Amino acid sequence: MAFQPRVGNASSTAGTQPGRASAVGYEAVRASRDFWTIQRRFGSFVRPACTLFIVWYFLFVIIAVFAPGFMRIDVFGDVNVGLCFGVLQFVSTFAIALGYRNWARRRLDPLSDRLRHRLEGGERQ
Amino acid sequence: MTGVAATSTPAPVVGTPALNFVIFAFFVVVTLAIAVNAAGRNRSTTDYYAGGRAFTGWQNGIAIGGDYLSAASFLGIAGIIAIYGYDGFLYSIGFLVGWLLVLMLISEPFRNTGRYTMADVLDLRLKAPPVRAAAAVSTLTVSLFYLLAQMAGAGALVSLLLGVSTAAGQDLVVAVVGILMLFYVLVGGMKGTTWVQIVKASILAAGAAVTTFWVLSKAGFSLSSLLHHAAASSAAGSKVLGPGLEYGVNTTTKLDFVSLALALVLGTAGLPHVLMRLYTVPNAREARRSVVWTIWLVGLFYLCTLVLGFGAMWLVGGNRILAAPGGGDSAVPLLADKLGGTLLFGIVAAVAFATILAVVAGLTITASASFAHDVYAGLMRNGNAEPADEIRVARITAVVIGFVAVVGGIAAKGIDVAFLVGLAFAIAASANLPSILYSLFWPRFTERGALWSIYGGLISAVGLIIFSPVLSGSSTALITDRHINFAFFPLNNPGIVAIPLAFFLGWLGTVTDRRSADPARYARMQVRALTGVGAERGART
């Protein structure tokens, strides 16, 4: 998981004052520091996580298809490498899903809430 | 894989058809009552298409799981494991890991930027009627293909359940499925269908858990001893415990499996009936929660099918499964018969039947929504249709789709369900996924890029299926006349060619487009996708 240090003061509105956002609209929000932070954080988690699980899955598929002998090596009793590898795919899927959920709750949600309130608060005025 | 198809040998009747019929009727009545009760009045389009956006994350997560754990998963995968062993397990892993893509890249942005359909998302980004039309065409194609797979499974399953062995009897069963399904859709709308899906998925999960526990207890709670018994009772011996029995024949079959794996992992995120469910929750955060619930449900369920499949191999035996009507699809019902006798057999088969009904209903809602919302309201009425008219069109479309599904289901009868679903995934991954990802995350994406990737992906995927051994030139082809052979594409699954091609065409169409993307539209899309500003509100925000 990528935990990068907070860059600057993420809560600063950096030129986009509350209430003024609606006047300048989406472009201004997009240019704001908070939004930039959300985008960067989102990418910094999702990009490596997606790459990781796709590479990990295809490693499994390629070995299963082109090196079946390796998968047949027994680990304990009649349980072989292939079965353990397969079950690990389940474990990694659960782990990445929970990891993303917890990470997003902590690192994305507060920021996106703040931005939404700012933009929608402006619209109501 | 089509070798697992149903044979026309007289059905060895398992269980008591009369008892099975009673259990089956009980399930149908209960689910119909749920649908009617939950439906309310379905007055607005939001009610009819999105269940009023009033479902909570866990409810929707279980409903998505219910949609996903179709007959192909419940019966098909366990059946492939029971016959080919480990290769079936490979299938289930592909079906599961694809959900991570839905969770991280699709669920929240998709919920934030659309209303009812996939075309809404592309429309917000590109504002182009031709793109909406293209998205509707691909949504309808994928839904129909998936629908066909489910209907094909229904005939085989019910012939096992009720001891129907004549072709005409099976056709009648498919027609009854179509009529019952239409009832759910027309009366229940999305809300009713979702509740049926939740109830069904819960019973399915409980049934799978109990049966798994039962099998494990027979094996002394030792996975190793279960595998040992299974391998001992299989004609292929210990080969079933490793990969390759089905896919390891030669390089073509190996490549075919890689192609299927690609389709499975990328196809989930392009399935219209899964995507549409993301709109039944009040906001993006609940959509994320839904998908996490789905991952748990689907993952644990597939772990159960591993035990069930090897359990069926051990306790029922591959030969008996292959000889039964429905072939591999009958593995789990036969296992239930072996363990719990007629009653458990009846319950499992009825759950499977309810599964087909509910999934088919979900697909029909998706397809009818796409036609009514995208084609009728969006294109023919320029977005100014009266909600009542739009719902009326959706209902008429549902009836037409039901009819097509029945006719197609009868024609496709006997083809392995999991195999057909694999093809639907390949079409979804090539026609839908590239344009969704590009429009959400690529600033430069243009209308031409969208059209090229949707039509390019759709035409190449469907075209390669037509020119594959699925349709002609092989012993398992749909066209049985061996003199007709136009299978110049060697693989059964088109994913490995069509998916990269669709991504490439989306890129090529964009970079060669003289008109450039509108930065303001992308800004709006991005802000909405990541923060939920301006997103469609639910009943409880």
Image (tube, rainbow, N blue to C red):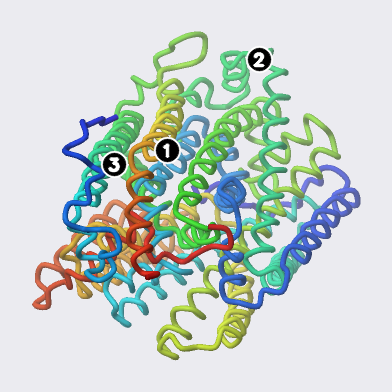
- The residue under the point 12% across, 78% down is B515
In the rendered image, residue B88, in percent from the top left (x then y), is placed at: 50, 36
The residue carrying mark 1 is A101
Real-space CA distance between mark 1 and mark 2, rounded to the nearest whole angstrom: 33 Å
Question: Could you tell me which secondary element the residue under label 2 belongs to?
Answer: loop
Question: Could you tell me which secondary element the residue under label 1 belongs to?
Answer: helix
Report the front residue among B520 and B418.
Answer: B520
Extreme residue toward the top, this view? A76
The residue carrying mark 2 is B221
In the rendered image, residue B93, in percent from the top left (x then y), is placed at: 45, 36
Quadrant assignment for the N terminus of chain A: top left
- The residue under the point 62% across, 44% down is B75
Q: Quadrant of residue B408?
A: bottom right
Give the number of the mark in front: 1 or 3. 1
Is B273 situated left or right of A30 in this image?
right
Real-space CA distance between mark 3 and mark 2, rounded to the nearest whole angstrom: 39 Å
Q: Looking at numbered disc 1 in the image, what kind of residue is underneath it?
A: Arg
- Mark 3 Cα-neighbour bin, 10 Å: few <14, some 14–19, many ≥20: some
Give the number of the mark in front: 1 or 2. 1
| Chain label for disc 3 | A
The residue carrying mark 3 is A46
